[in-house]
Amino acid sequence: MSLVKNFRMMSLYNQRINTQLMECCLALPSSTLEKNTHSFFTDIVSYWNHLLFGDLILLRRLALNNVAQLSLDDFVDFPSPCSPTDIYSKNVVEIAALRKQLDELIIVYCGSLTDEECEQFISYTTTEGEQITKAVADVIQHIFNHQTHHRGQLTCVLSQFGVDYGCMDLPVIVAEGSRSEFSPK
């Protein structure tokens, strides 16, 4: 399977799972959303803010390197990422709107990505000030791995709070798989 087909499938999974989990969170009272999780992030809202941060900073790094028609103009409606602890909003409705918009951008981005672009290298400075060079494919893979990692933590917290967030299995969520024509929903 080509990397591009895999990334397109993962962009759909990313959008659908974020929507599924966000719908669960939108149904929660603010007391639960702000309740101390005693985990990696202090509350559910902080998890969502960090997920936004990770996507924004990594996608901006790709945009700065002109990969797959992504440009900084695509980010005018988004906050500027600075730190992994950024709080863009404490309001889950506002976060949900940003999340939806960002997931749509990821789908468009992955839909325009080519295998040749996946092989290119980009250089950027990390939030810790380190200058590094990575293959585009590795940066994109990290976008999805970062999301999966923190959504795993979030689903653990949701479970402890008694929330049933449903099935998260890739073959169920993206039943069309990677081998079908790319058609975002």
Image: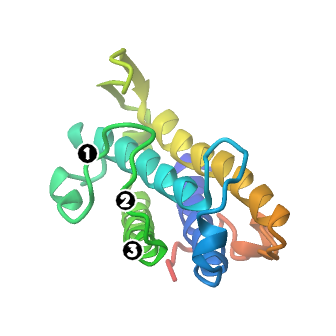
Which amino acid type is marked by label 3?
Glu
Q: Residue at x 64, y 49 (%)?
A: 150
Comparing marks 3 and 2, which lies closer to the viewer?
A: 3
State which tag comes first along the sequence, 1 or 2: 1
> Image height check: is 99 above or below 3?
below
Q: Of the numbered discs in the image, which one, if any, rests on residue 63?
A: 1
> Image height check: is 129 above or below 59?
above
Look at mark 2 in the image and give the residue it sits on: 109
Quarter of image, res 119: top left
- The image shows residue 165 at horizontal and vertical percentages of 77, 74
Which amino acid type is marked by label 1?
Ala
- The answer for how far apart the CA atoms under marks 1 and 3 are is 24 Å
Q: Residue at x 49, y 77 (%)?
A: 184
Q: Nearer the viewer, residue 52 or 85?
A: 85
**Element under disc 1:** helix
Q: Residue at x 79, y 74 (%)?
A: 163
- The image shows residue 57 at horizontal and vertical percentages of 36, 42
- The answer for how far apart the CA atoms under marks 3 and 2 are is 23 Å
**Element under disc 3:** helix
**How has the structure been colored for display?**
rainbow
State which tag comes first along the sequence, 3 or 2: 3
Look at mark 3 in the image and give the residue it sits on: 94
Looking at the image, do the residues carrying marks 1 and 3 touch, with CB atoms under 8 Å apart?
A: no
Specify whether residue 180 is in view: no
Which amino acid type is marked by label 2?
Tyr
Q: Nearer the viewer, residue 95 or 134?
A: 95
Left or right relative to 1: residue 75: left
State which tag comes first along the sequence, 1 or 3: 1
